[in-house]
């Protein structure tokens, strides 16, 4: 795979050089006249004519050092601009020759820098490295940080092409350090682009992709189209290595479009070679052949040997596919010859593999075996080069260490000799001194040994105890995770049938609203269902908080609006109980804040609900004040109060004052625990004071700043509109849903809202219809056959579709919803569909129809329920067939489709069982068929019971 050379930092040389500040002799041609002569020559279109005229002018300037330098520089620039690389090397080599005596002049630095660039473009990377190294040495003498940064960067590029990653990284690090201190935004963008090439070569694609996308953003800010094209080309090469064919082709074509616009034949050579290689990988041989011919055409146009090498490689593959082995042999031998001449070992390795195949087909078995052996040898060499470099480095370190030891040993020997001389002079006193010293040393060594043994034993004991504590901590953490997951799962499982209970009770209340005998029991069912739903919601919220999956949604709103909502909720309740309900607001109006409206309201409802519950006479009061950098809410009541012992546990989960309170007033003891958790997440706190039989006071302080602007506050929190009274809308909505009955239901609901509906049964059809009919809004199911919702969304974005797209899915966990929003979806709608939320979402993007009264949203779906029930027999046969084949991927897709449709049409048992199977099949390679068989049999039985039942209720 060819990695596109990122010479972004080098291209500036084509557009601006500093004129050399040299003293001109008296007979020099006037500067303006020389510029005019060169400009006249460079405006000629035929390059041979340009060369001839330039030769005449250059001969006349050779005796004038300054003018001749300027002439060579400008002609070298023109050669590079026209991609005449051989001529460019000749001009800059002559410039380097005549400036050999100038140690650190502008001309000498420029000459070797431009020689490096020219030979790099030719693919002669060893020569390029040598020229860049000379330019780097000159830049060090000149002590100009940006020149040093440029040379380190260019050397990194050349080493990357020469497959020397160690030197690549070393030079990039130096360049990055200098650019951070002295570089511009352009330099930093170029550096990101270049570093990405090294990461691609190391197969660290995530880091490379992040760098490339960041560099594209910077280049767009700088209006640098060339930089964007280089980044797109690198993205294309990276996607090719990852097997992401569609993204690879899109990126490469974006780069080709720019190169064709500016006429860069050299760049087009490499990109068409890459496109040809991609087409071969996809099996699109005819298209690949045309792309390979284009690559050869552009390589021939600029006589680029490295371009020939790259283009002939895919051409040889294509000729083999066509059966033209003689031409394929010529192509690959030419490519190999150039690769060996330029030292491109990677391309030589790949070419040897193709050569062996061709020779084997032509009956040249000995030559084929030689080519294959050469391929294996070169492959091993490439794999081991980096290892050898590391071993040499370590060997050097080892040798240096041994040398230091020898030096230390010599020093010790000299010290011993000095002691021996001193011993001869003072033998007696030295013997006594040595005896005393030896005794002290023995005692000291013994003491140190004992201390070392004690330290080792202590360390072992500490390590053992630490391991025990860590194991205990892991067990506790795992137990807490299991508990939180259990709470989340059981809460979710309870909510599924509970939603059906509440929905059916509401429907019966409306249907039998004139029958007073049945209204009472139905209202009891509805109230208790709502109470149970709130309890389950509290448990689910607590489990989310403990699992660190709970997220706040901050919006701007006025506190007056919040207080009005709370007042409306509790005013009638208190009146019915004979209590005085008061709200005292000491805040200036309007008072706009940025907080989580829903969660703050939930905390106040919990506190006020407790106050009303535990107060039998007197009043309940809500007082609001400013406090420091926030707002203080006080909830006061004249209820039963609490003593000190009860206050210690008031915020614990599942705790109330005592058992008598639970028996007398009911409740789960979750409200205050959840309220404290939510207040803490918002940066606030809750405190309480209470006296038995006199009442309680709860104080909640939430830090927030009052916003100056109130222009948007009325738009942030919209009141829920009644389901039965919704305004009709106008516009076109595309619904992408793979289940037929679900699709019919959504179409019926949307049609009743007044919008024009377009339907698609999978993501591929959805993309086609969206790009042909361009609807005002799209509802996109996530899991669909052929092309899922996420891939369809990405393709629509790449194609330029900018309309709102909503994720329509049964996946309703907050982290899943957040992932859809981060991708760019306009919003999320869960299954089964909440019609009020649907209308609320559509009304943000579609206009209300003029002159149309509000619409009753009670939709008759009895025929769809019956249709779904009748389809279950065929679905059961499909499930049985997939189970017998053990096609887990397709079975999971069918269960996902069943989950959404069964939940929508009220078959909760089927939805629950299908959901179990879908979750168990998330990892197809780890499926325990025996353990899963229980749920499979239940699902088949449930579908058969629905199909055969004579009491199927359809309404």
Image (tube, helix red, strand yellow):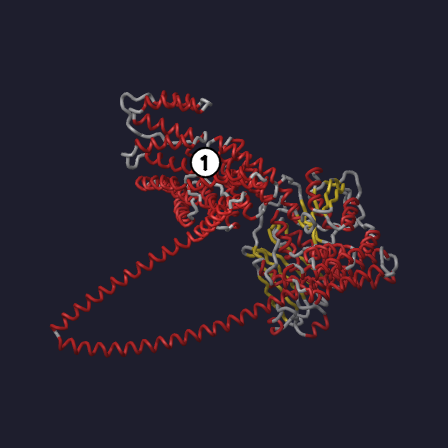
Q: In this image, 332 relative to 882: left or right?
A: left
Which residue is at a point 57% across and 68% down the rendered structure image? 477
Image mark count: 1
Query: Would residue 213 be seen by someone viewing this image from the given angle?
Result: no
Choose top left, top right, bottom left or bottom right for residue 88: top left
Judging depth in this view, the residue of 120 and 436 nearest the camera is 120
Q: Position of residue 808 (x, y in %)?
A: 70, 50
Circle 1 is placed at which residue position? 305
Q: Helix, strand or loop at disc 1?
A: helix
Q: Residues within 10 Å of mark 1 (few under 14, many from 20)?
A: many
Which residue is at a point 49% across and 72% down the rendered structure image? 467
Q: In this image, 36 relative to 477: left or right?
A: left
Query: Would residue 387 be seen by someone viewing this image from the given angle?
Result: yes
Residue 547 against residue 730 in the figure, above or below: below
Choose top left, top right, bottom left or bottom right for residue 653: bottom right
Q: Position of residue 800 (x, y in %)?
A: 63, 39
Q: Position of residue 219 (x, y in %)?
A: 50, 39
């Amino acid at each position: 795979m060819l990695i596109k050379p990122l010479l972004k930092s080098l291209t500036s040389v084509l557009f601006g050089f500093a004129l050399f500040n040299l003293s001109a002799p008296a007979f020099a041609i006037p500067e303006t006249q020389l510029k005019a002569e060169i400009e006249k020559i460079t405006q000629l279109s035929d390059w041979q004519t340009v060369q001839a005229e330039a030769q005449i002018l250059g001969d006349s300037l050779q005796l004038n050092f300054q003018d001749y330098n300027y002439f060579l520089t400008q002609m070298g620039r023109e050669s590079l601009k026209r991609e005449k690389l051989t001529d460019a090397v000749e001009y800059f080599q002559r410039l380097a020759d005549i400036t050999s005596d100038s140690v650190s002049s502008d001309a000498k630095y420029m000459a070797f820098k431009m020689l490096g660039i020219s030979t790099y473009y030719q693919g002669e990377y060893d020569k390029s490295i040598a020229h860049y190294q000379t330019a780097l040495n000159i830049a060090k003498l000149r002590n100009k940080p940006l020149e040093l940064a440029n040379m380190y960067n260019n050397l990194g590029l050349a080493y990357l092409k020469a497959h020397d990653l160690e030197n690549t990284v070393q030079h990039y690090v130096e360049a990055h350090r200098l650019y951070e201190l002295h570089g511009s935004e352009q330099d930093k963008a170029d550096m990101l682009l270049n570093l990405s090439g090294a990461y691609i070569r190391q197969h660290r694609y995530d880091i490379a992709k992040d760098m490339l996308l960041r560099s594209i953003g910077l280049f767009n800010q700088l209006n640098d189209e060339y930089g964007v094209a280089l980044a797109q080309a690198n993205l294309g090469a990276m996607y090719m290595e990852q097997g992401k064919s569609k993204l690879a082709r899109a990126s490469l074509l974006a780069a080709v479009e720019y190169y064709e616009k500016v006429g860069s034949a050299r760049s087009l050579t490499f990109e068409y070679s890459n496109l040809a290689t991609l087409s071969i990988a996809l099996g699109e041989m005819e298209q690949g052949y045309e792309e390979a011919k284009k690559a050869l055409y552009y390589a021939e146009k600029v006589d680029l040997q490295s371009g020939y090498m790259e283009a002939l490689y895919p051409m040889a593959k294509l000729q083999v596919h066509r059966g033209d082995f003689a031409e394929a042999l010529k192509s690959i031998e030419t490519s190999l010859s150039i690769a060996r001449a330029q030292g491109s070992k990677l391309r030589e390795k790949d070419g040897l593999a193709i050569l062996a195949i061709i020779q084997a087909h032509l009956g040249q078995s000995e030559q084929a075996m030689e080519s294959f052996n050469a391929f294996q040898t070169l492959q091993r060499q490439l794999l081991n080069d980096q290892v050898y470099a590391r071993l040499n480095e370590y060997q050097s370190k080892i040798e240096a260490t041994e040398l230091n030891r020898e030096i230390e040993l010599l020093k010790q020997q000299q010290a011993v000799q000095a002691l021996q001389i001193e011993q001869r002079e003072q033998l007696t006193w030295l013997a006594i001194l040595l005896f005393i010293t030896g005794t002290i040393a023995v005692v000291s060594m013994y003491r140190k040994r004992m201390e070392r043994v004690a330290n080792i034993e202590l360390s072992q004991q500490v390590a053992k105890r630490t391991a025990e504590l860590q194991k205990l901590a892991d067990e506790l953490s795992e137990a807490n995770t299991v508990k939180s997951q259990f709470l989340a799962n059981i809460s979710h499982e309870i909510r599924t049938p509970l939603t059906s209970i509440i929905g059916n009770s509401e429907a019966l209340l409306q249907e039998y609203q004139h029958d007073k005998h049945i209204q009472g029991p139905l209202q009891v069912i509805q109230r208790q269902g709502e109470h149970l739903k709130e309890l389950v919601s509290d448990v689910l919220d607590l489990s989310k908080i403990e699992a660190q999956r709970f997220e706040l949604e901050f919006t701007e709103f006025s506190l007056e609006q919040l207080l009005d909502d709370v007042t409306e909720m509790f005013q009638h309740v208190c009146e019915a109980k004979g209590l005085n309900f008061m709200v005292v607001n000491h805040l200036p109006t309007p008072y706009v804040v940025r907080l989580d409206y829903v969660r703050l309201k939930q905390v106040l409802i919990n506190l006020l609900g407790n106050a009303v519950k535990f107060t039998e006479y007197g009043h309940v009061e809500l007082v609001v004040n400013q406090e420091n950098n926030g707002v203080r809410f006080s909830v006061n009541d004249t209820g039963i109060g609490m003593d000190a012992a009860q206050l210690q546990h008031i915020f614990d989960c599942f705790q109330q004052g005592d058992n008598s309170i639970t028996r007398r007033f009911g409740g789960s003891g979750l409200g205050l625990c959840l309220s404290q958790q939510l207040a803490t997440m918002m940066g606030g706190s809750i405190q309480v004071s209470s006296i038995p039989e006199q009442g309680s006071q709860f104080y909640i302080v939430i830090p927030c700043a009052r916003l100056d602007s109130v222009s948007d506050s009325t738009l942030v929190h919209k009141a829920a509109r009644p389901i039965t009274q919704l305004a009709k809308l106008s516009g076109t909505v595309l619904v992408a849903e793979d289940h037929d009955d679900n699709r019919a239901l959504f179409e019926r609901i949307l049609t009743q809202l007044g919008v024009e509906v377009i339907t698609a049964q999978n993501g591929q059809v959805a993309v086609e219809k969206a790009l042909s009919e361009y609807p005002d809004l799209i509802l996109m199911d996530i899991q669909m056959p052929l092309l899922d919702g996420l891939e369809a969304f990405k393709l629509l974005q790449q194609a330029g579709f900018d309309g709102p797209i909503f994720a329509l899915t049964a996946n309703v966990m907050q982290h899943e919803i957040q992932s859809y929003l981060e991708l760019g979806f306009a919003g999320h709608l869960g299954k089964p569909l909440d019609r009020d939320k649907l209308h609320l979402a559509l009304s943000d993007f579609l206009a209300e129809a003029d002159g149309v009264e509000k619409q009753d949203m009670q939709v008759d779906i009895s025929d769809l329920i019956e249709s779904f029930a009748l389809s279950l027999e065929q679905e059961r046969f499909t499930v049985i067939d997939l189970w017998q084949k053990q096609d887990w991927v397709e079975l999971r897709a069918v269960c996902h489709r069943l989950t959404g449709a069964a939940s929508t049409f009220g078959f909760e048992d089927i939805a629950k069982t299908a959901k179990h199977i879908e979750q168990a099949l998330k990892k197809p390679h780890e499926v325990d068929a025996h353990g899963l068989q229980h749920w499979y049999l239940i699902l088949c039985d449930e579908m058969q019971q629905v199909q055969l039942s004579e009491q199927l209720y359809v309404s």
